[in-house]
Image (cartoon, rainbow, N blue to C red):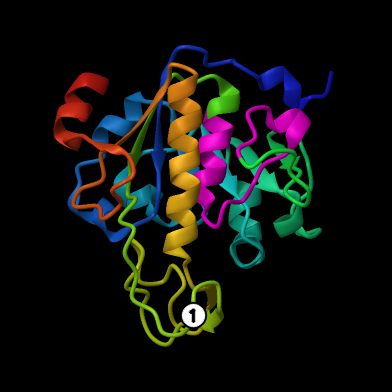
Amino acid sequence: MSRLALLKNRHSGQRCVVVANGPSLNQMDLGFLRNETVIGLNKIYLGFRKFRFYPRYYVAVNRKVIHQAAPEIKAMNCVKFIGDAGADGQIKEDALTYLVNTCMPGQRFCRDIALEGMHEGWTVTYAALQVAYFLGFSQVVLIGLDHRYEYAGQPNEARRMDGPDPNHFSPGYFGHGQDWDNPDLARSEESYRIARQVFEDSGRSIVDATLGGACEIFDKVDYLQISRVLV
């Protein structure tokens, strides 16, 4: 049995919160996350001091993100799932870090990332949903999934940000000359529909508690009600 396989279903029947990186996080009281099992994404470390929570798990698959943030990712004191294609030698496995196959995933939604790898699905949130499923969570609460972007060019096109980043909770997220890839909202939504179906077929659920989020794939819930339940 692989080291990664030992993590399968370790949170069976529990609930987690996947924290995406939209600007709506700045409008939320995130104090309740200190009591919850959190999966953080990409450059969430930029908000640790402001938001005053720390994730138990972390997911990144995008090559640009990983290369830009490699020192910060290595310094994070949590369990990390990193796409091997994006890691590209910048991140190596250690006691807290698992490199997961994203080059040739076994399924469109990989239920067992130790055996099948992980499908990137045009959004790191989709990768995180596969991690959450693998870990056994019965409900995933999404926050920060604003699902709206300001950008020029075509979906998936490589661009360089001129000025502050308007699309994430920190203006320096991709801002001020950093490279990023334009989002592909249509393919992201395709991925989310697949994830919702897989979860529901297994008697599990994904709910979207993003404040003012534009994604219509998941059932919406009020984050204030969720936070009172979670505390």
Question: Which residue is depicted at the point 33% across and 24% down?
Answer: 35
- Judging from the image, what secondary structure is the residue with disc 1 in? loop
What range is drawn magenta here?
109-132
Give the vertical position of 198 relative to 40 (above or below).
Answer: above
Where's residue 31, x and y in %? Answer: 25, 35
Where's residue 52, x and y in %? Answer: 33, 42
Give the vertical position of 131 relative to 214 (above or below).
Answer: above
Quadrant of the drawing holding the C terminus: top left
Residue 20 seen in render: yes
Quadrant of the drawing holding the N terminus: top right
Give the vertical position of 86 relative to 203 (above or below).
Answer: below
Does 113 lie within the magenta span? Answer: yes
Q: How many marks?
A: 1
In this rendering, position of residue 16 left or right of residue 105? left
Front residue (pair 175, 139): 139
Where's residue 117, x and y in %? Answer: 73, 39
Give the vertical position of 177 relative to 3 (above or below).
Answer: below
Mark 1 lies on residue: 154
Toward the bottom, the furthest residue is 162
Question: Which residue is depicted at the point 21% across and 20% down?
Answer: 229
Where's residue 154, x and y in %? Answer: 49, 80
Toward the top, the furthest residue is 13
In this rendering, position of residue 168 left or right of residue 104? left
Q: Quadrant of residue 10?
A: top right
Does 94 lie within the magenta span? Answer: no
- The amino acid pointed to by label 1 is Gln
Residue 44 seen in render: no
Q: Quadrant of residue 112?
A: top right
Question: Which residue is depicted at the point 50% across and 40% down?
Answer: 194
